[in-house]
Image (tube, rainbow, N blue to C red):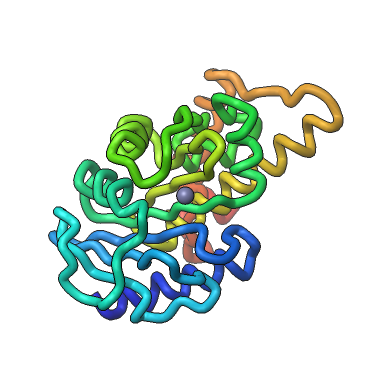
Amino acid sequence: MEGIRAAIATACHRLAREGLVVGTAGNISVRRGDLVALTATGVTLADATVADVTVVDLAGEVVAGGLRPTSEAELHLGVHRRFGDGAIVHTHAPASTAFACVFDELPVIHYQLLEVGGAVPVVPFIPFGTPELAAAVVAAMADRQAVLLANHGAVTRGATLAEAMERTFVVEWACTLYEKASVLGTPKVLGDGQQRAVRDVMAALRYGRPQPHGDGPASR
Ligand SMILES: [Zn+2]
């Protein structure tokens, strides 16, 4: 898990650098098999090192590292137990959190939200670190890769750490977009038919993946 611990520390630096986390507020985890590497509690993410990433088993028992895991360990472990190997990113990113202080769902105002499964639900407020919050997030993530937490923040998951990170940035960008559009008027929402049409195009173009030049329709 050493390489994964280092990758998590690097991802923490990026979240801090890009203004998605402030101080110690936010946490990242990656599951590989029966082990989960996750940030420790009280760590300033901008300065995180490998020593600030603790490895636990799926029951939360520490396997490696000297620091107590994040207070949201139950949330991370609950999602990992339900969905298997992958990564989770949790932040209190400003636009995402502001949106989750006001609305019950982020609608599909831009097709990029299809990358996280479509509309992003806002899980009703439940105090952090509780098994109740963990259970609510697991349930809300059944058919999507991002959820917002009312008056709290955002959670994204992905097959890889890079994917989970990218989804955190997409949700934050979409919440910012919603905010900007709302200043101008009422944001229009893409309907089911429009979303289906975009999915068809994405499938045909293998959208979002780097592709060799000259390979298939996306090169045209
Ligand atoms: Zn939190």
| Image side of residue 4 versus residue 201, left or right | left
Q: Is 135 drawn above or below residue 88 in the view shown?
A: above
180 or 97: nearer the viewer: 97
| Image side of residue 110 versus residue 30, left or right | right
Q: Residue furthest right?
A: 184
Q: Is residue 200 visible?
A: no
Q: Is 163 drawn above or below residue 2 in the view shown?
A: above
Q: Is 57 drawn above or below residue 115 in the view shown?
A: below
Q: In which quarter of the image is residue 194?
A: top right
Q: Position of residue 36 (x, y in %)?
A: 23, 62
Identity of the residue drawn at 53% across and 19% down: 192
| Image side of residue 164 versus residue 131, left or right | right
Q: Is 66 drawn above or below residue 154 in the view shown?
A: below
156 or 26: nearer the viewer: 26
Position of the N terminus, as image quadrant, is bottom left
Q: Position of residue 6 (x, y in %)?
A: 37, 78
Identity of the residue drawn at 61% across and 33% down: 101
Q: Is residue 178 visible?
A: yes
Q: Where is residue 50 in the image (x, y as percent from the top left)?
A: 36, 80
Identity of the residue drawn at 55% across and 64% down: 15
| Image side of residue 140 versus residue 204, left or right | left
Q: In which quarter of the image is residue 7?
A: bottom left
Q: How many labels were placed on the picture? A: 0
Identity of the residue drawn at 32% across and 46% down: 75
Q: Where is residue 167 in the image (x, y as percent from the top left)?
A: 50, 50
